[in-house]
Amino acid sequence: MTLVEALRPGLDRAVPALVLRLDPNAFHHGTLAVIRSLGRAGVEVHALLAGPADPCARSRYLHRQHAWTAEPGDPGELLADLAAVGDRIGRRCLLVPVDDACALLVAEHAGELADRFLLPPQQPAVPRRLADKAALAALCDELGVAHPEQRLPRSPDEVAEAVRSLGLPVVAKWSRPWLLPPSSGLRSTRLLGSPAEAAALFAQTPVAGSQLLLQHRLPATPAGDWFFQGYLDGSDRWLAGGTGCKERAHPVEAGQTTLGRWLPNPAVQALALRLAASVGYRGILDLDFRYDPDTGEYHLLDFNPRLGAQFRVFVDRQGLDVVRALHLDLTGRQVPPWRPRLGRAVVVENIDVLSAVQNWRDGRLDLAGWRRSLRGVQERAWLAADDLRPFAAMAACSLRQRVRRLRRSRL
């Protein structure tokens, strides 16, 4: 992207931004994408992060990193931290939460934050209803939206019955993933291959902090996994975003997008916007769908009431993305008409290689197919010629983690 493209449309550089994340994951590439997107446009970007050695903090486009002092489960202390950071910045600034916990905190305490921060006019209860996997299924039932069959087992016997009913492998999700303790080692979503695995995971319920949800696994099909990201303003207008095909994920079939491509899918877009309108959602949103070839329907898998890490798939012909649209809109500037750049792809290089290797082992990918899959990749999550330090820091952090795991395995 040229400098002219990066600075167009013109954002209000007098209004800084604060990227907000409680998740201690040092490899959260969405955080870095926000920093680069706004920083390249001349906006002063701050970040309030959980980890002191976060590779994202090495970006040349980050003005200053701030650290949480509060415990994640204490809203009062978290709000005090936010207020202190806002006072240090010294100007009313844009808030950009990039994980569920921060999105819920911001939405449910918007009134207390409004003096220091710019926020979309969100209904406080809406994000929690969408982020809770069990509540989302109930909403889908109300609206007649397809979603995978699922169970909320309350006992080991119900776990066994759910596995028998849903079939193996079965998808396991924690209904409120933002409550997972970082030290637990539990993932928000897993693909389970046996009743014993399901029983063992259910036993972790007291640690996880929410219910275990077991879900029928829809069969994976070529070009069957889709996501939608968009920005809806205060009058319910869709201003930016689009539909993307999830070409690879890690873990395979039950993980985050590692290679995503901007492709048109009117059915998915219409369904996503209908869901958002039904609850009066405002702001940035990220939804995941899987196509069911047996019924010809797209099933909703997740509705994330926040920015998705892969949002840079959707950068239009004038350099606009959903984060820049948010900044323009909330600072009172006109968001220009959206100009799609179909075929644009983004790869998360550090974990896409793991997904590619697994697909190769499973016989779903060969060398020629891998090369073809990378056509149209116009951006990498970590490696950028104008901002090399985050990639180096990420690589060093990955190496340290692997050395620690190797040492533990030898004990």
Image (cartoon, helix red, strand yellow):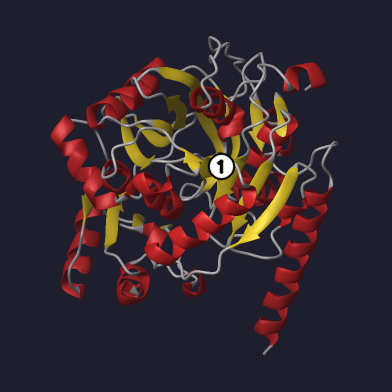
**Quadrant in which residue 85 is drawn:** bottom right
Quadrant of the frame with the N terminus: top right
| Residue 240, position as x, y percentages in the image | 50, 20
Tell me if residue 285 comes above or below residue 238 in the rendering.
Answer: below
Q: Is residue 49 above or below residue 372?
A: below
Between 377 and 231, the residue placed more toward the observer is 231
Residue for point 71% across, 28% down: 41
Residue at coordinates 82% horizontally, 41% vertically from top-left? 387
Amino acid type for the residue under numbered disc 1: Ala
Left or right of 285 in this view: 393: right
Tell me residue 295's x, y (percent): 26, 28
Q: Where does residue 58 sit, x and y in percent of width and height? A: 77, 53
Quarter residue 136 falls in: top left
- Residue at the left extreme of this rendering: 142
Question: Residue, x 69% and y 59% (percent of image)?
Answer: 54
Left or right side of 185 for 128: left
Residue position for label 1 = 309
